Amino acid sequence: MSKRTLASAVTAFTACAMAFGPGMSHASAAGDPGPSTQKQSTAFMRSSAAKSSDSKAAYDRIVKKLPADWQQRRDNARKRLGIESSPVENMLKAKLAKASAGTTAQAIDPTQYQCSATKLDGYVDSILEPVDTFNLLFLQLVGGLDIPTYDALLLGKPNNPAYALPAAYAPSLMTTFGYAQRFWDVRLNDVQLMAMHGTVFQDVNRVTKVIEFMYGVGPADAVGIAKDIISMVDSDPALKGGDHPIFTLNAFAFTGKGDPDPVIRKIPDKMIFGDGILAALKAIGLNKVGPRAVLGHEMAHHVQYEDNLFDSPLTGAEATRRTELMADGFGTYFLTHKKGVALNPTQVLQAEESFYAVGDCSFDSDGHHGTPNQRRAAASWGAATVAFSNNPNKVMPSLTLAKKFDKALPVITAPDAPTSVNAYRSLVVK
Ligand SMILES: [Zn+2]
C-alpha cells in the first residue's frame, strides 16, 4: 500500500530524509525513529544540562498517565497517518538529537551537517536559537511537535477559521489550487485545502482529541496530558503559545481512500500547508514561487492517488523515488503550462533549484525521493514537456503524461542525467 500522506514543502523538492543516526532504519524514516528515540531519551534524561525543570515535571506527569508502550504508540500514530517528515523538520530533529546527545554525539551521522552552508540550515538555526532546547526535546518525546499536523488531518475543516490559510498566502494559494483542480483530468474537487497553525496549543479540546488518537488513552487521561503539553509550550515564551514555525514545518497531500483503518478512511482528501513551511520558504527567498511550487507538487500526488499511479512494478525506495520525481515533473508541467499557472519556466526551475539544493545536504543513502540532480532532471522534463509541445493550449491526459514520465524515468535517474530543459527536447517530442 502506498504512502497516504505525502509530505512536502520542502520534501516535495528535496527529497532528503535526514537520518538521526546510523541506527535509524528506513522504515522509521517517516518520523521519530523507534530505537534511536529510546537512545535519545535515555541520553537526554541523564543529561546534567537538563534545565527545563517545569517541562521535566510535566514530562514525568505525562509518562505516568501513558501506557507502558507509549513510545511505540506515538510512532505508530505517525505511521497510521502515513506522515513523512519534511527535510526542514528532519533538520530540526537532527539538531535536537545532537543537543540531546551533548558533546558525545555518536548517535549523529556527521554527514548530515554538510548542509551547514545552506540558507535553510541558517533559517532552522535562527528559529531554534531563542528556544530552550531541552524544553523542545521533551515536547518532541511526547509527540508535541506532531500535534498541529494531527489536529489538521483529523479535525481540520476548510471553512473553520482555525484552519484558514494565512491572509498573506490565501489568495495566491486558493487561486492556484482552483487552477490545479481544473487543470488535471481527474476528480480533485473533493480535496480540501487548509492550513495548520501552532495556535492549536491554545485549545485544550483539540489537543485532547489528538492525544486520544496518538496514545489511545481515554478522555480523562488525555485532557490531563493535553494540559501538561500545553504547559510545556507555555513555559517557554519563545514558543509564543505554539505560534512558532517549529510546530508546522511541513505541507501534505493526504488521502484515506481505501485504507483498511476506518478512522483513517473517513478523513477527507486534504492538502495542508503549515505556517512554518511558508515562513521557511519566505526566509530562504522563495516567497514568490515557492508556495505555489509546493502546491503543484502536492496536487500531483492527488492526481497520482486518483489515477492509481502508486501502483507500479517497483517497490520500496525505488517506488517512492518514482512517485516523488513524477510529482516534481507533473508539478512543473502544471506551473509552466499556459492552461495551468503559466509561470516563466526559468523562474519556476530557479525556485525549485533552491529546494533541490537542500537535498545536497542529505547523504540519503537510498535516495528514495531522488537525489537533487534527479529532481532537477524531473522538473526540467516537466518544463520541456510544456515547452516543446505542438499545441501549447492542450493539457495532456494525466495517464498519458504518466506514461511519458515512466519512459523518461531511466534517463532522469541515470547518474549523469542532464538537467537542462533543452536536454529533454528529443525525449518529449517523440
Ligand atoms: Zn512528494
Image (tube, rainbow, N blue to C red):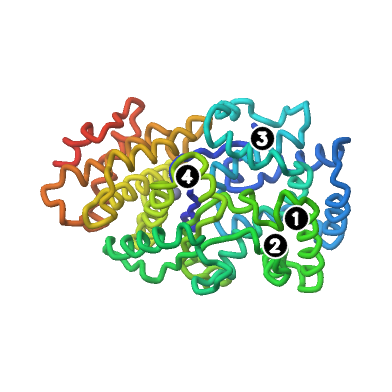
The type of residue carrying mark 1 is Val
Q: Earlier in the sequence, mark 3 or mark 4?
A: 3
Question: What element does badge 4 sit on?
Answer: helix
As helix, strand or loop, the secondary structure at mark 3 comes to: loop
Instruction: Name the amino acid type tagged 3.
Output: Gly
Amino acid type at mark 2: Phe
Say few, some or many: other residues with alpha carbon within 10 Å of mark 2 (under 14 / 14 to 19 / 20 or more): many
Identify the residue under disc 3: 23
x then y, percent, for residue 171: 41, 62
Q: Give whichever of 320, 108 is nearer the camera.
A: 108
Mark 1 / mark 4, whichever is N-terminal: 1
Label number found at residue 316: 4
User: How many numbered badges does the structure rendering display?
Assistant: 4
Would you say the beta carbon of the disc 2 residue lies within 8 angstroms of ligand 1?
no
- Residue bearing the label numbered 2: 201
Quadrant of res 410: top left
Q: Residue at x 37, y 35 (%)?
A: 374
Residue at which label 1 appears: 233
